[in-house]
Amino acid sequence: MAFDIDILIVYSASDNAQASETGNGWVTDFKRFLEMMLLQVLGEKPNVLMKAEDDSITAANLQDVGILIPVLSEEFMSSGACLDTIEEFHKNISPSDPYRIFKVLKTPLPLDQQPLKLKDKLGYDLYFINPESGEIEEYKDFFGPDAEKNYWMKMVDLAYDIHESYISLNQSDVGDVKSIYSRRNIYLAETGHDLSIQRNIIKRDLQRHGYKILPDHTQPQDLDLLKSQVKNDLANCQLSIHLIGSSYGDIPEGTDLSVVDLQNKLATERSSEIKDKATFSRLIWISPNLQNASDKQLSFIENIKRDLASSEGAEILQTPLEDFKNIVREELIEVGIDKRLSKATGSTNGKSSIYVLHDKSDTDNVKEIKQTIEDAGYRVLTPTFDGELLDLRQHHITNLRDFDAAIIYQGKVNDQWVRMKLLDLLKAPGFGRRKPIKGKLIISSKDNMMDLSAYENHDITVINTNTNSTIDSLESFLKDLN
């Protein structure tokens, strides 16, 4: 299914009026950053358009839109034209369609104030809560330390979630793509507030290695709808993962059980109902540190440990969370997709490896650099530019997990491309990396070097080919690695 407009960003014009330090409006920057990230995960640049309330896109035009991204704010909710666009687009979505609406929150907006059609959609909070004042702030410096930890992590989530929908929407145009992108589904249960960040890290790790994570929507507030949705999601999964910490979790109206407790009970029911136990299993992690847990939470945990019914078909672990993450990686990732990838990449022959990140347009320019690295006794890892989209991304992720040092080459690419590669290096542990990075080097042919002040604590070496002898400086860098 091909669309004239792959992605349409709908927003209130007032939300794009205030310029950031880049000199652009907030929504303009958001579009630019999203395009860069989608180019990485898709391997191609989708057609992304912006629509403010006064821009004319008719209902007929909306039928040619694949994915809609509304940028929610109080101003958006006050715009009849923005709300009308949501309604018109929603008419084009059939129950058999994949998720095609991704809501972005520029400022906080309670669920009961959001459009009815968007309440069950996943939200991506792209605002900043000042830890000192508690006030909500917009990001002005998109490359500062706060933005790196919050804004960009949410952008990564959004890009990968759009990737899932984009691939599904275009399956019919890509031959045997269905078998290429087939994957196991995993139910990653909602957690208490104390483990929400850790749940998100595990979610991203699994997604990047080819797994589809459910639930992929906001949980209903109605108890009966909630139970029905959880059962449906569990029925489509081969594994459920439950993280249980000190917080009992939110309790829906009409019950005294939390969502965390309900999910566990419903997963138990599914496990007890199926005949072939190999088709569904469960991993339950219980925090070893429960000092702040309520009596109700402690009772819930004791029941899980003691009651065989509640743990049927489950493996219960009470280990440090990092150990649990490693178990998940080993059982789901290294035994699965990564095993295939490691065979494809071949033996390392015991050599340390250097990942040379470069754009396809700079392939000829890095030949001497790669030869110098090999002459120094290192194995060279490089990106690949040919093949299916998911395989290209998995090749990149495998390199991020395996390299010892990294070199980013900036020839014909801009500073934003370099920043995206730097972010990949800094987030490498989220891809399953377990060893420290020995060195990070940027080789640039630009007259004006990009501002790296936001990365001053990350030990990045820079070589400017216009002012330094590139090969001499590279050899010095390689020597220092030892």
Image: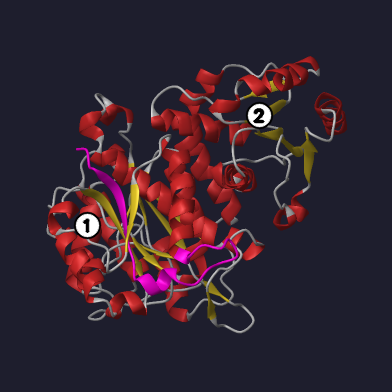
- Residue 99, x across and y down, in percent: 25, 52
315 in the magenta segment: no
Q: Earlier in the sequence, mark 1 or mark 2?
A: 1
Q: Residue 424 vs residue 54: left or right?
A: right
Residue 110 seen by the camera = no
Front label number (1 vs 2): 2
Q: Callout 1: few (<14), some (14-19), or many (20+) C-alpha neighbours within 10 Å? A: some
State the CA–CA distance, disc 1 to disc 2: 46 Å
Q: Residue at x 36, y 44 (%)?
A: 163
The type of residue carrying mark 2 is Val
- State whether residue 99 is above or below residue 366: below
Secondary element at tag 2? strand
Q: Residue 322 vs residue 106: left or right?
A: right
The residue nearer to you, when weighing 59 against 267, is 59
What are the residue bounds of the magenta stretch? 1-26
The type of residue carrying mark 1 is Lys
Residue beneath disc 1: 231
- State whether residue 227 is above or below residue 280: below
Quadrant containing the C terminus is: top right
The residue nearer to you, when weighing 331 against 383, is 383
9 in the magenta segment: yes
Residue beneath disc 2: 356
